[in-house]
Image (cartoon, rainbow, N blue to C red):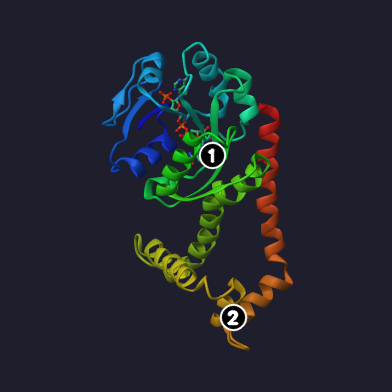
Amino acid sequence: MKHGFIGFGNLAKAIYLGLKNEVDIEFFYYARSKKDVDIKFCSTLEQLVLNADIIWLTVKPQDLSTVLEDLKKLDISGKTILTPVAGRSIDFIEKHLGKDQLIIRIMPNLAMAYKSSVTAFYSNHPENEKGEDVYNLLGKLGKVVKLEESAFDLFTSVFGSGPAFILAFIQIFKNKLKEFNLPGTLPDELLLELTRGTTLYFMENQKDYSIEELINNITSKGGTTQAGLEYFRSHEIGKHFEEVLNAARNRSEELSKNGS
Ligand SMILES: NC(=O)c1ccc[n+]([C@@H]2O[C@H](COP(=O)([O-])OP(=O)(O)OC[C@H]3O[C@@H](n4cnc5c(N)ncnc54)[C@H](OP(=O)(O)O)[C@@H]3O)[C@@H](O)[C@H]2O)c1
């Protein structure tokens, strides 16, 4: 299978790193300037389209219209268009490329590089088997879930922006650690182990226990965890945090409206 990236920035690089050891995949890219990467550079869009079966639209939302206008002048029949572009609907792309074109919209995150993305998937032609091939390929880069396109805004806030929100929480822990005066990178190393241990605890037990039960296992009556959780609950920290997700979702909806 031949994959062509239009634009080779952060996301295209993550996809390439995640897939580069797969057999039977060839990569090409076209961008405004040549990058320091060992895959084939196409100096024109035409060259990329000739080479690729799957065309990834890995450009920023504001650059998408220009790319689509150039793309529609070329013969892309039978090719799969794969778009991770945030806030740009299938309808938006169909307006440029037509409704017959197979277009797959996904919402991944950069953890594709470590095969640990959580990716939403939607195809405008679900009956087309080429879409299933893409779905199976994305499964090699983490978990992939088929969703209606209307769910992409909430999905983006939870799984697209989610890593930044979790890191913002870890930053609060790190600020607290300043009291210890630990040297160099040691605070980050300790926090990494804390999050890794918590993830493993969740992974090992999630089939048999709910999150609430897992929290209860760490909580003894009258103990430190209980004191912290009582503050967490009585000050409705969870409810406030939900507003963080709502703000991200609202922004995604706004961007979609402006762009479609
Ligand atoms: N990064 C993420 O975590 C993430 C997650 C989910 C979805 N996405 C989506 O993925 C897309 C790409 O994001 P990114 O973070 O990879 O962006 P990026 O790092 O800014 O990369 C964009 C690439 O597009 C190229 N480009 C811009 N205009 C072009 C044109 N007219 N023709 C050809 N190439 C052009 C740029 O080339 P030059 O460098 O040569 O200018 C650059 O290589 C975005 O739409 C974003 O919404 C990103």
Crowding near the residue tagged with mark 1, few <14, some 14–19, many ≥20 C-alpha atoms within 10 Å = many
Specify the farthest residue to the left: 38
Q: Is residue 176 above or below residue 80?
A: below
The residue closer to the viewer here, 184 or 169, is 169
Q: Earlier in the sequence, mark 2 or mark 1?
A: 1
- Which image quarter is the N terminus in? top left
Quadrant location of residue 233?
bottom right
Q: Which residue is mark 2?
A: 216
Say which amino acid is labelled 1. Answer: Ile
Residue 246 in the image: state x and y as whole percent.
70, 50
Amino acid under disc 2: Asn
The residue drawn where x is 37% and y is 63% is 189
Count the numbered circles shown: 2
Q: Quadrant of the C terminus?
A: top right
Q: Which residue is mark 1?
A: 106
Side (left or right) of 63 relative to 252: left
Mark 2 against mark 1, which lies toward the viewer? 1
Q: Secondary structure at mark 1?
A: strand
Q: Position of residue 197 (x, y in %)?
A: 42, 70
What x and y, as percent, mark residue 251? 67, 40
Q: Quadrant of residue 11?
A: top left
Which sits in the foreground, 207 or 164? 207
The residue positioned 67% from the left and 33% from the top of the image is 256
Q: Secondary structure at mark 2?
A: helix
Disc 2 and disc 1: Cα gap in Å?
36 Å
Q: Is residue 143 above or below residue 221?
A: above
User: Is disc 1's CB within 8 Å of ligand 1?
Assistant: no
